[in-house]
Amino acid sequence: MILDSQLEFSSAQAVTASAASTNLVDLGIARDIGVGEDLWIRIGVTTAMTDSGSDSTITVTLQTDDNASFSSAATVATLVVIPATTAAGVEYYIKLPAAVLAEYERYIRGYYTAANGNLTTGSFDMNIVKDIQHYTDFASGFSID
C-alpha cells in the first residue's frame, strides 16, 4: 500500500468530540474519480479510545462540498462506526462509494462524529489508497532442532 500525502484526510488526528478531518482533498474540476481501478478509504486507529463507560463510538462519514470551507457540506456516505473498545492498530478499508460518484463536488473530507460524548483519548489516520494492506502472518508449522 502506498500512501500519498495529497490523499490524506487525517494523520494521527486526535478525536474526542465531533470534528472534521484535518485535511481535505481537492478533486479539481475533473471530479470523475470512479474510472479505472477501485479506490479505498483506509481508516486506522492510531491511539485507542478511552471513555468512562466503554460505550462511546466514532462514526466516520465522507463529506463533499463545492467550497473549501464546507459551508454547505453534504454527506456522501457513512463509512464505519468505531466502538470505544477498538484497539490501536486496527484498520478499516471501505471501498470509495462508486454508486454516488456523480454527487462528488470539488472538495471531499472525512468527518468524525462522537456519540455518548465521554471520550478522553483516541486518534485516527484516514487516507484514500489504491490497494489494501492485506498481509497475514502464519506460523511456520515446523521447527529446527
Image (cartoon, helix red, strand yellow):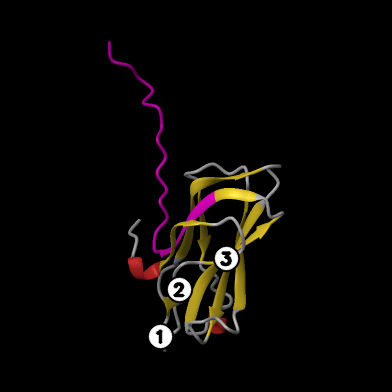
The reply to whether the C-beta atoms of the residues labelled 2 and 1 are less than 8 Å apart is: no
Residue 53: image location, x then y, percent: 71, 42
Residue 131 located within the stretch drawn in magenta: yes
Residue pointed to by mark 2: 24
Label 1: few (<14), some (14–19) or many (≥20) C-alpha neighbours in 10 Å: few
Tell which circle, 2 or 3, labels the residue nearer the N-terminal end: 3
Residue pointed to by mark 1: 28
The kind of secondary structure element at disc 2 is loop
Using the image, determine if residue 74 lies above or below residue 1: below
In the rendered image, which quarter contains the C terminus? top left
Q: Residue at x 61, y 59 (%)?
A: 17
Magenta stretch, main secondary structure class? loop
The type of residue carrying mark 3 is: Ala
Q: Which mark identifies residue 19?
A: 3
Residue 39 located within the stretch drawn in magenta: no
The kind of secondary structure element at disc 1 is loop
Q: Residue at x 55, y 81 (%)?
A: 70
Q: Which residues are magenta?
A: 122-145
Tell which circle, 3 or 1, labels the residue nearer the N-terminal end: 3
The kind of secondary structure element at disc 3 is strand
Q: Quadrant of residue 36?
A: bottom left
- Residue 51 is left or right of residue 92, and the answer is right
Residue 78 or 86: which is nearer the viewer?
Answer: 86
